[in-house]
Image (cartoon, rainbow, N blue to C red):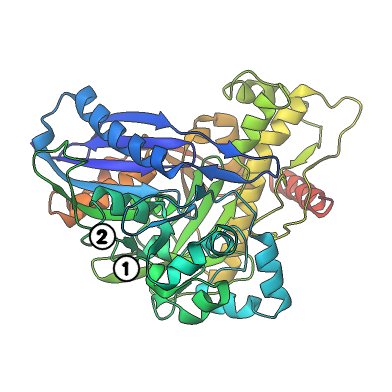
């Protein structure tokens, strides 16, 4: 028997997933890490903690599964993409905490570059609108504000990257500083046309080119690891993908027009558009991956607050004790109520791109209560995803026949039916929530020869079909768009 080990390093914690030689998920272990948030709302993670947790969950999943660790064939990694790291090349010691994708501390840097007239150049080269969401501005902030980093970078002592490159560096004992094409395309420092780091963009953000990771095919050679001596013989790292790209791959969205939405703390909506990039003002263009020597591009829209809205309802408003209550409360809400929640707690991303928007509740009446506000919290997730998909549909000119979804909130039957209704297409949910880790595992398994393309038939799916009238759909969606204008 041979097994594939997959590490899914996400915003809230680190998971280890173990798959057998048929691609069946056998076992999972998790370990959360601390969310470091200061009074400015800046969000950070401890890189040492993340690496230590990675080692621990790998050991835990093997122990829990009861397998022989010598039978692990390869390792795949998926990760939280835009979260940005900086460390000493010689010692591997972090020079600052990881700056999390949610953190907008680079806003002033982006505003200054826009004032100087660079925004359009950034968009044309990267497919991404100038934004503090992406690593370029986060890394620029580190270079400008952390003592010694800029000076030491000039002499080649500094390594920077996303979490995948940090893990690869540490797992290979500092022998490999690599990232894959999917993660590179999300940095706002990568030219999606030349498929290289862009010298003009690096200079614009003040980042030295020799600090950057080598870019490798997603199914390429990322070195070997023994997990700090835990394995008797090292195994290859041969599947690396950003988490949303991993979910796209795991969902089997391999052809143009296939689209998936990952529901998490935030959400990613991603559509495969094939071998050529298409620029769009509402959503971003990135690489899906480079696998088998071939590049696929995607359109993607990211939403800051989807599952996080449910957390807000629970932890801050105390309207629910657990996420499972939302379905019952939403069904009990007054069907005539037209309350909308616009969750612009840190501005609005795609497709609205309004970093100064404020969260608001619109349309309340005297009879609006707990049920209606909770329902509005659920429905705002579906509305945001629908608006992104509409922007993609009109931009790419591709017919979208269904939406494939994954993530914890997909267990909510009310949300999934409403998502199908507001989109007017079927929504299909696989029988596993671990699509990011599955994608990395499938990529590594195919790369090392354990799996083939038939692996994608493993997932079983349930479907929701639209049942809402066209008139009601239009009324509800128009009300949402008016609410967004007021945020």
Across and down, in percent, residue 217 comes to 28, 65
Q: How far apart are marks 1 and 2 (CA)?
A: 8 Å
**In the image shown, does 52 or 340 lie closer to the viewer?**
52
Label 1 packing within 10 angstroms: few (<14), some (14-19), many (20+): some
Task: Answer yes or no: is residue 22 visible.
Answer: no
Judge left or right: residue 117 versus residue 45. right
The residue at 55%/74% (across/down) is 279
Number of on-image labels: 2
Say the numbered circle drawn on residue 381: none
Which dot marks residue 176? 2
SS of the residue under disc 1: strand
Residue furthest right in the image? 366
* Crowding at mark 2 (Cα within 10 Å: few <14, some 14-19, many 20+): many
The answer to whether mark 1 and mark 2 are in CB contact below 8 A is yes
Q: In this view, does 369 lie to the left or right of 323?
A: right
First of labels 1, 2 by sequence position: 2
In the image, residue 296 sits, relative to residue 311, either above or below, namely: below
Badge 2 marks a residue whose secondary structure is loop
Residue nearest the viewer, comparing 92 with 410: 92
Q: Between residues 361 and 89, which one lies in front from this camera angle? A: 89
**From the viewer's perspective, is residue 390 above or below residue 49?**
below
| Residue 435 position in % (x across, y down) | 37, 43
Where does the N terminus fall, quadrant-wise? top left
In this view, 311 is above or below 201: above
Residue 231: image quadrant is top left
The residue that label 1 is drawn on is 214
Return the residue nearer the eye: 204 or 306.
204
Q: Can residue 195 be seen in this view?
A: yes
Residue in the picture at 53% in, 70% down: 396
């Amino acid at each position: 028997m041979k097994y594939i080990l997959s590490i899914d390093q996400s915003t809230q914690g680190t998971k280890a997933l173990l798959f057998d030689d048929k691609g069946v998920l056998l076992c999972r272990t998790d370990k959360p890490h601390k969310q470091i948030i200061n009074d400015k709302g800046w969000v950070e993670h401890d890189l040492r903690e993340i690496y230590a947790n990675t080692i621990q969950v790998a050991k835990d999943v093997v122990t829990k599964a009861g397998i022989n660790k010598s039978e692990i064939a390869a390792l795949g990694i998926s990760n939280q993409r835009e979260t940005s790291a900086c460390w000493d090349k010689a010692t591997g010691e972090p020079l600052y905490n990881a700056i999390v994708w949610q953190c907008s501390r680079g806003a002033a840097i982006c505003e200054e570059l826009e004032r100087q007239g660079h925004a359009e150049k950034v968009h044309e080269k990267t497919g991404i609108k100038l934004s503090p969401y992406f690593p370029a501005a986060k890394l620029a902030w580190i270079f400008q504000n952390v003592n010694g980093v800029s000076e030491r970078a000039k002499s080649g002592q500094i390594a920077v990257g996303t979490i995948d490159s940090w893990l690869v560096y540490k797992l290979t004992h500092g022998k490999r500083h690599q990232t894959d094409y999917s993660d590179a395309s999300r940095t706002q420092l990568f030219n999606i046309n030349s498929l290289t780091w862009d010298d003009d963009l690096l200079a614009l953000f003040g980042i030295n080119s020799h600090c950057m990771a080598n870019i490798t095919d997603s199914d390429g050679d990322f070195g070997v690891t023994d997990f700090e001596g835990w394995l008797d013989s090292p195994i290859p790292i041969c599947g690396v993908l950003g988490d949303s790209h991993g979910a796209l791959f795991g969902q089997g969205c391999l052809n143009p027009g296939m689209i998936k939405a990952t529901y998490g703390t935030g959400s990613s909506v991603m559509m495969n558009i094939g071998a050529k990039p298409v620029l769009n003002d509402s959503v971003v263009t990135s690489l899906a991956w480079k696998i088998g020597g071939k590049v696929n591009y995607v359109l993607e829209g990211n939403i800051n607050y989807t599952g996080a809205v449910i957390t807000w309802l629970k932890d801050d408003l105390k309207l629910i004790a657990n996420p499972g209550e939302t379905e019952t409360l939403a069904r009990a809400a007054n069907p005539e109520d037209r309350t909308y929640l616009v969750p612009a707690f840190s501005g609005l991303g795609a497709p609205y791109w309004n970093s100064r928007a404020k969260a608001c509740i619109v349309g309340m009446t005297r009879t609006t209560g707990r049920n209606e506000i909770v329902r509005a919290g659920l429905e705002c997730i579906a509305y945001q995803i629908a608006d992104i998909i509409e922007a993609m549909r009109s931009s790419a000119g591709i017919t979208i026949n269904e939406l494939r979804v994954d993530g914890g909130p997909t267990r909510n039957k009310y949300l999934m039916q409403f998502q199908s209704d507001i989109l007017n297409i079927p929504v299909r949910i696989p029988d596993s929530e671990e699509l990011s880790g599955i994608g990395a595992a499938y990529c590594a398994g195919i790369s090392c020869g354990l799996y083939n393309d038939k692996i994608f038939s493993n997932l079983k799916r349930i479907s929701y079909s639209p049942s809402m009238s066209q008139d009601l759909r239009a009324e509800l969606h128009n009300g949402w768009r008016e609410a967004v204008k007021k945020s």
